[in-house]
Amino acid sequence: MNISKEVKVGLLAVIALTILYFGFNYLKGIEFLKPTKTYLAVYDNVAGLSVANSVTINGFAVGRVSEIKIMQNRDNKILVAIDLNKEIVLGDSSIAFLTSDFLGSTSIDLRLGNNLRPLEDGDTLIGQLDKGIAEILQESAVSVGDNLQLTIRRINTILDSLSGSTNNIKTSLDNLAFISTDLRQIIHTNKDSIPKILENTNNLISDMRARIRSLKPIVDKFDQLADSLNDLSLSETVNRANITLDNLNLALERVNSGQGTIGKLLVNDSLYNNMNKTLENLDKVLIHLDLDPNYFFAPLGKKKKKDKNNKE
């Protein structure tokens, strides 16, 4: 039997569309060959949810949205049918959160919770709307608006305070202009001497550098002196000084106790009296020697003359 080209093209188109459909859904994580269960969820607003959108548990795709329809007899609520893999067990506390990402794609995120009673095929899940990006931004915008309003009030307060200082600012600017004018006049008047001043300044700096360099040997010598002082045996010198002081203290103790000649001289009064008496006799002899030296230096064998006042 001959098949026309049109039939062949049509069959190829149907096969290609079928493969495309199943391949696209397979890439989305939907496997048609696995058995599934159908659950229902009711929402007030599906927020852009469409058929074939994914159903996930902790980010892992476990099913898809199979049907969406409106229930006009129930205040226009939205009924959503979910096809899940048969291995997934849901319970009476499982919640189907309707969420949106940054790109606006809407999906259903299942949160199982503590399942006390497992649900059967066709049972209804608890449907809730999760906070979307728009709601989060709206809540953030309220706080940002309040902060912006407070900032504007502070700026207005600052501007009001600055408005009273306008005259002071103008006066300061005028004074600054006068100072700038005077400075330009000074520079213009001394423009011929400024190069000489700069040259003298450079010469002074060069001379100071040369003097600082000349001081370096002196500083090095002081460093060497300090090092040599550090190398001295100061501890030995201190020990010797301590020994000398101990000996001096011992000698002073002996003197105070009357030991030795000096101690006896200081302590014994009789020695002191004898010395005074000896000195007095010596003084008399010297006086006699001064008055009559011949009495002491007469030649041997010559008869001494008696002094009228003194006996031989």
Image (tube, grey):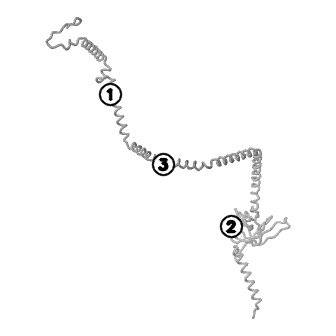
Q: Amino acid at mark 2?
A: Gly
Residue annotated with mark 1: 251
Residue 191 image position (x, y, % from top left): 62, 49
1 and 3 marks in contact (CB < 8 Å):
no
- At horizontal 72% and vertical 79% (from top left) the residue drawn is 20
Side of 78 where 177 appears, left or right? left
Counting labels gives: 3
Q: Amino acid at mark 3?
A: Ala
2 and 1 marks in contact (CB < 8 Å):
no
Work out whether mark 2 precedes mark 3 in sequence or the reverse, and give the earlier one. 2
* Label 2 neighbour load within 10 Å: few <14, some 14-19, many 20+: few
Residue sitting nearer the eye, 90 or 76: 76
Circle 2 sits in a helix, a strand or a loop, which is it?
loop
> CA separation, marks 2 and 1?
103 Å
Residue sitting nearer the eye, 124 or 137: 137
On screen, residue 290 above or below 257: above
Work out whether mark 2 precedes mark 1 in sequence or the reverse, and give the earlier one. 2
Residue annotated with mark 3: 210
> CA separation, marks 1 and 3?
60 Å
- At horizontal 75% and vertical 87% (from top left) the residue drawn is 9
Looking at the image, the residue that sits furthest to the front is 192
Circle 3 sits in a helix, a strand or a loop, which is it?
helix
Residue annotated with mark 2: 59
Residue 263 image position (x, y, % from top left): 31, 23
Residue sitting nearer the eye, 161 or 285: 285
* Label 3 neighbour load within 10 Å: few <14, some 14-19, many 20+: few
* Label 1 neighbour load within 10 Å: few <14, some 14-19, many 20+: some
- At horizontal 70% and vertical 62% (from top left) the residue drawn is 113
Quarter of the view holding residue 260: top left
Looking at the image, the residue that sits furthest to the bottom is 1
